[in-house]
Amino acid sequence: MPDDPLSINYFEGLFTRLKQNSLLLMDTDGFILDINTAFTGAYGYTRDELVGKNFSILFTEENKMKDLPRRELNITLTQGSSSDNNYLVNNEKKLIWVAGESVLLNDQHGTPYILKIIHNIHIQKESEASIMRLNDLNESILSSIEDIVLVLNEQLNIERANSAFFKLFNNNKNLTETLPRLENLFKSMDEKEDVLNSIRETISQKKGFSKKEVLLIGDDGKERIFHASCNILHNTIPGNHVLLIFHDITHNVQIEKEREDIIGFVAHELRNPLANIILCNEMINRLVHENKQEQVLEFVSRSNNNTMRLNKMISELNDSTKVNSGNFTLEYSTFNVSEMVKEAINTIAILQPAYDIILNDNVHGLEIRADRYRLMQVVTNFLTNSIKYSNGNVNIYISLQSDRESVTVSVKDEGLGIAKEQLPLVFERFFRAEKTRNMEGIGLGLFLCRGIIKAHHGKIWVESEEGKGSTFYFSVPIS
Ligand code: ADP
């Protein structure tokens, strides 16, 4: 302590006896003249360790690089005081957040000194930082979840909303001034009243609700189905607030509806041949009693045909679930592709003698390694379709081509053809072109063909012109 620098006795008492606030006295070049005991207690330095050193040793390297010690001195000297919030390096080289206030004083001889009062704000700064980190975390959680999250006040005005909300209901604008009103989001008046009343009840009775199904209209004009859930928001901003969450279930509802449609459709399609079989059996029963042998045979044959139809549909359904779940396995063997195609043609020709299936074989006994049974299923399906959708044109052309790597099979008909806009859909599950919906079939054959060819790492495609005919192709690697 310099020789009574301020010539005020009580200042010396103040300097030495302060327990909470650390004091540091230095000259105008920043050389430390004295520290009080509170300083030693707070930052570990003894008086001897600091007196005579420049106060810049208390700054971090980064702050020294920024020239903060000199700037602090300059401001104090020119403006009479300065304050800052910085890290102070204690004598164990640990960083402690401090708030410092420096004042310029003169002793009785007019010599200027600087008194720096240092306050430890480490805990406060750390908790501020952790609150900020928590806020950042909350924000990023909120913006990453797909559910719409809203904070409503007692008047049911939207006070806060996450990005999922802005995406759907505010054209991606994040402006709170233009936030839409909650009541304008609903499609039906009844649902709106029901939800708004339930939110009011949540506030008055402090008991929330969950999974109320509502239909909301987005900015794009599209309707979406949500599960709304609401709860009181505890320990936050003053006043009663509720958290309202909308979980989009549009997709699930659509899937559920599609599933029901499919079940209904499949049940209907299965019932048709089954009804025929029941009818045939009744007829057979009657005809046997009446001893009408010839007619019995006719109905047995009809019953057989329908049994085969039923069997085909059930196999297709079974295989299609395998294709969909990725459980479709192939049984590889080496076989003659021309022979396999001829076998398929013969099977169809026996059933459909009126049709002329013309083979153009350019591979002549080429051997390939593939699943013979499954590839024959594809050829048979192409041929059956070409006949089914032939519109009475009896010529069907089947061709075999090969390059070094793959073999390509095509089946061409001169029948109904497929409309251009429907072409991309023909290999989809349950697809049936509009014009053919009244005909027998469940739209699984080509879906299965695609699954089989995909499993062979091959290609499947179609060329078609409505009213003129179609050509279906597949190619698979030779080995
Ligand atoms: P299905 O014949 O049992 O309906 P597919 O999956 O084999 O099922 O065919 C799907 C749909 O593609 C058919 O319903 C039909 O509308 C159309 N399609 C398939 N092959 C042809 C073809 N050769 N000519 C015209 N349309 C066809």
Image (cartoon, rainbow, N blue to C red):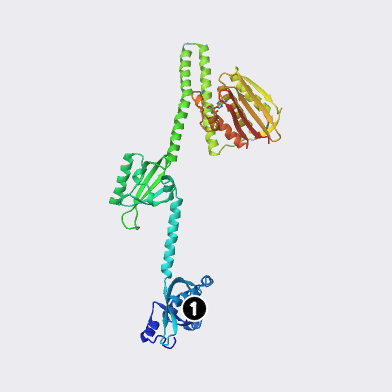
Q: Which residue in the rendered view is the most extreme toward the front?
A: 78
Spot occupied by residue 435 in the image (x, y as percentages of width and height)? 50, 24
Q: Secondary structure at mark 1?
A: helix
Spot occupied by residue 447 in the image (x, y as percentages of width and height)? 55, 32
Q: Determine crowd level at label 1: few under 14, some 14-19, many 20+ residues with C-alpha closer than 10 A.
A: many
Residue named by callout 1 = 55
Q: Residue at x 44, y 32 (%)?
A: 261
In the picture, which quadrant includes the C terminus? top right
> Could one spot residue 102 in this view of the protein?
no
> In the figure, 281 relative to 187: above or below?
above
Q: Which residue in the rendered view is the most extreme toward the bottom?
A: 3
Spot occupied by residue 89 in the image (x, y as percentages of width and height)? 49, 74
Q: Which residue in the rendered view is the most extreme toward the left?
A: 204
> Could one spot residue 246 in this view of the protein?
yes
> Ligand 1 near label 1 (Cβ, under 8 Å)?
no
Q: Residue at x 70, y 27 (%)?
A: 362
Ligand 1 in which quarter: top right
